[in-house]
Amino acid sequence: MWSFTAAVVTLWSFAAASGSWDVCANHVGLLQLDLSLTPADTSLAVPPTLRAAEPLKFLHIPKCGTSFLNAIVHTPSLCPDLDWRYEVNSDVLSKSFERDFWHECPQVCNQSRFECNSASQTHEGIGSSYSSYKGHLITMMRQPEQRVLSAYHDARFDHGASRYPNVSAYAEGVAGLVTCQLTGAKSVDPVPQCGELQKADALAAAQRLREGFVFVGIMEEWDMSMCLFHKIFGGHCWHSDFENSRPTDPEDTSPYNVSELEGFRDELDGLVYEEAKRIFREQLVAYNVSTDSCAGCWSFRRASGVVETNLHGAARPMAMARMAMAWSMALILGILG
Ligand SMILES: *[C@@H]1O[C@H](CO)[C@@H](O)[C@H](O)[C@H]1NC(C)=O
Ligand SMILES: *[C@@H]1O[C@H](CO)[C@@H](O)[C@H](O)[C@H]1NC(C)=O
Ligand SMILES: *[C@@H]1O[C@H](CO)[C@@H](O)[C@H](O)[C@H]1NC(C)=O
Ligand SMILES: *[C@@H]1O[C@H](CO)[C@@H](O)[C@H](O)[C@H]1NC(C)=O
């Protein structure tokens, strides 16, 4: 083990000396963590909270963190046939990476520990299935006006936007989408099919969130959400947890300008979102999660080649070199371990 640590440090120093790895000096601490991140990761201790919540069921609200799947699949024992190099993204899978993943999910994940979603209905409503999912559900929530703007401006998927003349008409048309997904049985993408929703529906949705979900993450607090998720369910934080957070680019973390919506507000989903934030804060306290206690987890943000690849075209070769290095270390670890 120690001779191997030395070997990795040597490898790392070499990369630094050759100038291909500018942030190298900051990452010696990560090496110790890397040693435990072998493909045998799945043998890690499984917390009782996870055992009690199995099979986990991911409610995927449109535009709310497909890459949350990266944290899920690397949770110990859920998907024992995946090693930690696997990522649900277009580098590892195709451009339709979420659908690809749900297709192979039954082969690579243990469905008595993690229930695979249908590849054709990734945004299903849990309506009539709620009683069987209760106590197993996990999700990511997003501020409603931000969610709808993100859906409208999605360059890859339409989400029903082309059916409406402009963005505010679209927002009106899909208002209450999250309420509908939590209480109705049909898919909410491209558009929700719950008819006219009332405040009572939103209250029922909020109640389901509180009583039926074992984890409610918040998109606006992505890093804290990933840290909390691992505190509750175990497993290591890893750079793919942060693929979407893009912490180094202020432009990417700034929200959409809601003035486009001409004053539209999604009152019902707003109510559900407020409850989500309350649940989130309560869990942070219950699991003693704070900026301090997340420092170790967050050190993986800087180890991410993918984040920088997305952000700065010019940084790509360096980021790729970094990824290649990480992958070869993983291989060596696999062989030695
Ligand atoms: C799947 O999980 C169940 C427990 O929920 C366990 O008994 C079984 O051995 C697991 N299968 C594999 C292949 O790990
Ligand atoms: C958007 O479309 C709606 C419905 O057709 C219309 O009433 C509204 O004036 C439009 N808004 C803008 C800014 O064009
Ligand atoms: C949002 O857009 C409006 C209209 O274009 C503009 O007046 C306002 O300054 C923008 N707000 C921000 C925070 O950029
Ligand atoms: C909470 O975490 C802090 C570190 O951030 C630690 O000092 C403290 O002992 C922890 N408290 C509990 C109750 O675990």
Image: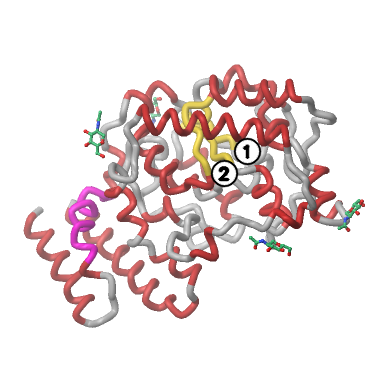
Q: Quadrant of residue 330?
A: bottom left
Q: Position of residue 250 (x, y in %)?
A: 50, 64
**Does 329 appear above or below 32?**
below
Q: Is residue 4 magenta?
A: no
Q: Quadrant of residue 211?
A: top right
**Is there a contact, CB below 8 Å, between mark 1 and mark 2?**
yes
Q: Which residues are magenta?
A: 26-38
Task: Name the kind of residue labelled 1 in the image.
Answer: Ser
Figure quarter occupied by ligand 4: top left
Q: Position of residue 304 (x, y in %)?
A: 38, 62
In-image side of 323 versus 313 (left or right)? left
Q: Secondary structure at mark 1?
A: loop
Image disc number at residue 102: 2
Image disc number at residue 118: 1
| Residue at x 66%, y 29% (from the top left corner) | 182
| Residue at x 41%, y 39% (from the top left corner) | 79
In-image side of 262 versus 122 (left or right)? right
| Residue at x 30%, y 64% (from the top left corner) | 326
Q: Nearer the viewer, residue 80 or 84?
A: 84
Q: Position of residue 140 (x, y in %)?
A: 54, 40
